[in-house]
Amino acid sequence: MTESAVVKTINAVKSAFRGYYFKPDMVEAPDKMEQREFGYMQFGQPGMVRHLSFKSMKELTATIMKEVPSDIYCSNAYYRFPTYPMQEKQWLGADLIFDIDGKDLHLPCVPSHSYPICTNCGHASAPVPDEKRKEEHYSCPACGGKKADDISIPCAKCIEGSKREVKRLVEFLTGDLGMQRSDIHIYFSGNNGFHIHVSDEAYIPLDPQARSDLVGYLSGSGLMAESIGVRKGNAENLFFIKFPKSGLAYGWRGRVANKLKIDGSSMIKLKHIVEQKGGYAAFKADLDRMTRDIGVRIDPQVTTDVHRVFRMSGTLNSKSGLAKIKCGDNIDSFDPFVDACLLGDGKLSVKVKTQVKLKLKNKSFNISKESAELPAYAAIYLICKRLAEAS
Ligand SMILES: [Zn+2]
Ligand SMILES: [Zn+2]
């Protein structure tokens, strides 16, 4: 991209974002905002402006209108002195937040809508089928560069996949941990996933280790064979069956028992299952695979980091131009490509880098020409995905 095209493109996105933030009450006010740290990113500039504090939404809105940031964040943590350096802020606690990202689910549809974009020159190519991808190393047709970012235009299946994980997480949180459904708030991340915020005060003081233990439980790592009744014998690979006194009905025991089709009276059956697998060690490895498969795919780092800043609800995501917004009670009826697609539909001329398909606001676009005039929401989406530039 030439220097003037970069400036023109940034200005187009900035102007669309400014139009969005100009509307009243788009950004959701966080609880106890005076105790939180805020930060934002600027268009065309690396690094985050951090350690900011705002006493009111009016103050925050004034800064947003003045700067028109590309991305706006606030801490999940509460601090006595939010603007001080990290070691001097005096941490008071942090909201519990989970991140489910479509890219971590490894869905089979992803290669068909992932566009390699050269990290050196920005050249975009058509998606490469999965089989070919493994054989060939990337080589940029324009500059010969060997590195590319895979930019995905998530499809309906990707969103379905993420929603399935969200529902599983909610089941764990309410069923196993006894949280109230009304304390669990689901947000679309603004690109390809969901953030789940828990407003139950009891979790605010948890330290990183406790949050990590929670992630371990939810993702199904480290369940012991003993806890479902398979106990290690005296010699290598020997075992015996003794069910736990509290039974196999609840939590992880219930899930595994269900999968193995056993209950508290199935001693012989379980013995056969373990023998068939090849003994204690083999069963243990198999159990580990099974529980990870049943567990929820959450990003462990996001939940355990108590000093992180999170994208604010109601702000735009510069990776897509979509908004991070609350999904409402029924996640099934939430469609991010309609409900979070909130930019205007005035026409914008763009130069599209490769043939591309997308669907936004229930309208399908199949763009094969280099120059196109698109509604702003679609043009900005493609620019944010680095698949187009303003012309
Ligand atoms: Zn290149
Ligand atoms: Zn997909």
Image (tube, helix red, strand yellow):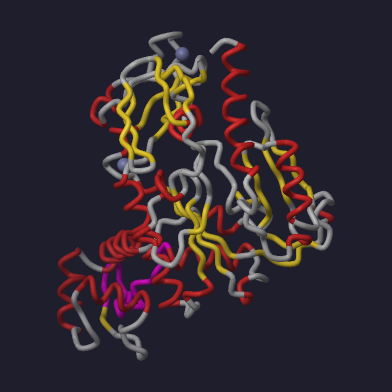
Please tell me which residue is depicted at 67% across the width and 60% down the height of the picture: 30
* Depth check, front residue: 104 or 267: 104
Give the answer, above or below, for where 265 lies relative to 291: below
Please tell me which residue is depicted at 40% across the width and 45% down the height of the picture: 337
Quarter of the render that holds ligand 2: top left
* Depth check, front residue: 91 or 192: 192
Q: Which residues are magenta?
A: 219-239
Magenta highlight on residue 236: yes
**Corner quadrant of residue 95:** bottom right
Question: Percent from the top left, x then y, of residue 316?
Answer: 57, 43
**Corner quadrant of residue 115:** top left
Question: Percent from the top left, x then y, of residue 252?
Answer: 36, 74
Question: Percent from the top left, x then y, of residue 267?
Answer: 20, 84
Give the answer, above or below, for where 239 lies relative to 3: below
Please tell me which residue is depicted at 53% across the width and 13% down the height of the picture: 1
Q: Hey, which residue is sitting farthest front in the picture? A: 346
* Depth check, front residue: 341 or 186: 341
Give the answer, above or below, for where 14 lies relative to 244: above
Give the answer, above or below, for where 233 lies relative to 75: below
- Count the numbered circles shown: 0
| 332 relative to 144 in the view: left or right | left
Magenta highlight on residue 101: no
* Depth check, front residue: 148 or 134: 148
Question: Percent from the top left, x then y, of residue 151?
Answer: 42, 31
| 243 relative to 218 in the view: left or right | left
